[in-house]
Amino acid sequence: QFQPPPQSALVLTPTVSPASSPRLQLYAPILSKLRVLMVSRMAKPEEVLIVEDENGEIVRETMKDSDAIMMYKTMRETLVYLTHLNYDDTENIMLEKLQYQVDGTQWSWHNLNTLCWAIGSISGAMSEEDEKRFLVTVIKDLLGLCEMKRGKDNKAVVASNIMYVVGQYPRFLRAHWKFLKTVVNKLFEFMHELHPGVQDMACDTFLKISQKCRRKFVVLQVGEAMPFIDELCLNLRAIISDLEPGQVHVFYEALGYMVSAQADAPTRDGLLMKLMELPNQMWQDILSQAKQTNGESLKEATTMKHLQNIVRTNERIAMALGHPYMVQLGHIYVDLLNVYKAYSELINQSITSGQNNMVLHTSGVRAMRAVKKETLRVLDTFIEKSEDNELVLTKFVPPLLDPVLGDYVRSIPLSRDPEVLSLFTSLINKLQSQMTQEVPRVFEAVFKCTLDMITQNFEDFPEHRSNLFNLLRAINHHCFPALLTAQSNFTLIIESIKWAFKHTERNVAETGLHTLLELLQNVQASQSHVMNGFYQNYYLGLLQDVFSVLTDTLHKPGFKLQVMILSHLFLAVESNAITCPLWPQDGSVTATSNPQYLRELLLQMLSSSFPNMSQSQLTTTINGWFECCKDQASFKQHLRDFLVQLKEFGDSTELYAEERQAELDSKASDLRKRQEAVPGLINPHARHDLDMSDT
């Protein structure tokens, strides 16, 4: 009988070398053939955008092939293991096939593609020294091939392969400045290549390299007259001259990562302003023209398109650079809000002069709204990334309130931007209790009018829906005292939370449940008169509504949160935390204590709703809830049993969703640990190893 060796050849230790494994020697010839097969048939990675179509032409990929991506992941993993088993053989096979491409004996798009996809897939599977020797040959040969080949399609294929390979080896590029500089300059060349897909791939690769090698571009390298980023600033206009707006945004995001690596603040700020000279100049020209024409030029389609692109460029820089973007935002902030205000007025004028809401769908109004949305996004991104709360609160919030909130209130429902709600959610999450003073104003401006929009039905304004409840959750979480200022508002808030967790849209329902749970926790931590007043007014209504979504079969995914809310409500009564009577004080009900009254009320409520359950069953169930409410796991099991007994729930898998998710998370964590134990299994752009840190 065959006995497997106690030590796998993959697990290399000082005492067991791969060459001494009899099993490995036995399989060596077969494994070598397998390597050749894998390299010659490698599937296309997700990053490659240039493909050969059914007519044999090289085109830009229009739709992701998910089957090919899954196949690539499996083949990549297999090839990484094969490389660990015998690195020399893998290298020799790849270099031999590359030589056949260079000398033309086996040249074809397919052969070069599969070879380069295989080379890129084993990044990290070899030692740094081996990787260096291997890649120097590969990159030199590929660059030579690019110069040698004629014809646009041939050049596009070679270009895409160069870009994919260099993008997969950031560790090598960081350690070899000359190669890094050569590669980046080659990417700049490809940015002028008008073959479909080449420019996109060049910008994407430049972004990946900038993220992983950012520090190399801002320090002075040996043999250079100036840091690379200074050189780039001088040629910036020429480099991006042939790029489409979307590609320019990716390019500027890459520049943002580079600038973020500059540790010296004054130098970093100077770099940022130098890189933003081009968009800032366009911005100033547009504003000057608007002043001369009394705002008429802002209505021109080209002007609106330019503004949209400038603001989006700023948003990408803010995302990559983080807090230091403040210098650039400070430079344009007042004008940005003025442009926002001007477009708000122009949209309202168009709506007023038009006979119906169709005016909102005209190209002019849509372009104006696009500029407004981009403005809100850039502010949202900056606030999320900012690190100086005091500065945001004192310098950025006051000028923001009137143009944005005032416009939201004055606009008709169809022209209100959901990004306004998202922006103030970010502000409250960032500034937390420091925003408490401003919450009543925010609440007054957006809450009631948005609620009127979304409570007509469950379908209209989906973004406003989720954003409004996210805002309410943020206010409740960080600025709870602000909610207690007006009783009429508070009742409206409770009703809106109920409406949210009854929603059939899963995200909205979950946000509603989260908000209610956090609200109950805040109430519990408040003074006793606040807590008693809250429970006296809202306890019974909340209990009834949570039970209704628990048992209606439409809200199964919310089971975990429903359990937590109900256990909180039961515990508040069982522990006698609520000292005021919950039953009506008009003499219609005779009760001596809250626990007794609640048991009777639940029995009556459940009996009428579920006649298939006997009184004794329900009494036992209700008593079980009260007894177990201190133990979350036991309470959850009791509720599960109750729902199964109802015989209305059908499939009960959702009741175990939390346990199933925990199991999936555990498996994913174990898989990640196993992958991390084998160098190269994790994509270089998905890992952050110590040896990959950019210092």
Image (cartoon, rainbow, N blue to C red):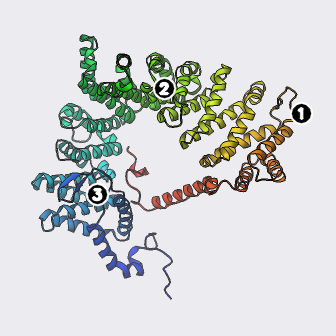
Between 284 and 69, the residue placed more toward the observer is 69
Q: In this view, does 299 lie above or below 167?
A: above
Mark 2 or 3: the one toward you: 2
Q: What residue type is labelled 1?
A: Thr
Which of the marked residues, 1 or 3, is nearer the chain's N terminus? Answer: 3
Between 355 and 174, the residue placed more toward the observer is 355
Which of the marked residues, 2 or 3, is nearer the chain's N terminus? Answer: 3
The part of the image, by quadrant, that contains residue 599 is top right
On the question of residue 385 being in view, the answer is yes
Q: Is residue 158 above or below residue 512?
A: below
Q: Badge 2, how many Cα within 10 Å: few under 14, some, many 20+? A: few
- Residue indicated by mark 3: 132
Please provide percent x and percent y for residue 324. Answer: 40, 29
Which of the marked residues, 1 or 2, is nearer the chain's N terminus? Answer: 2
Please provide percent x and percent y for residue 226. Answer: 23, 34
Q: Which mark is residue 590?
A: 1
Helix, strand or loop for disc 3: helix
- Residue indicated by mark 2: 388
Is there CB contact under 8 Å for labels 2 and 3? no
Please provide percent x and percent y for residue 21. Answer: 42, 78
Q: Which amino acid does label 3 sit on?
A: Lys
Kindly report the distance in space between the C-alpha atoms of the residues bearing marks 2 and 3: 43 Å
Between 640 and 567, the residue placed more toward the observer is 640
On the question of residue 219 being in view, the answer is no
Helix, strand or loop for disc 1: loop
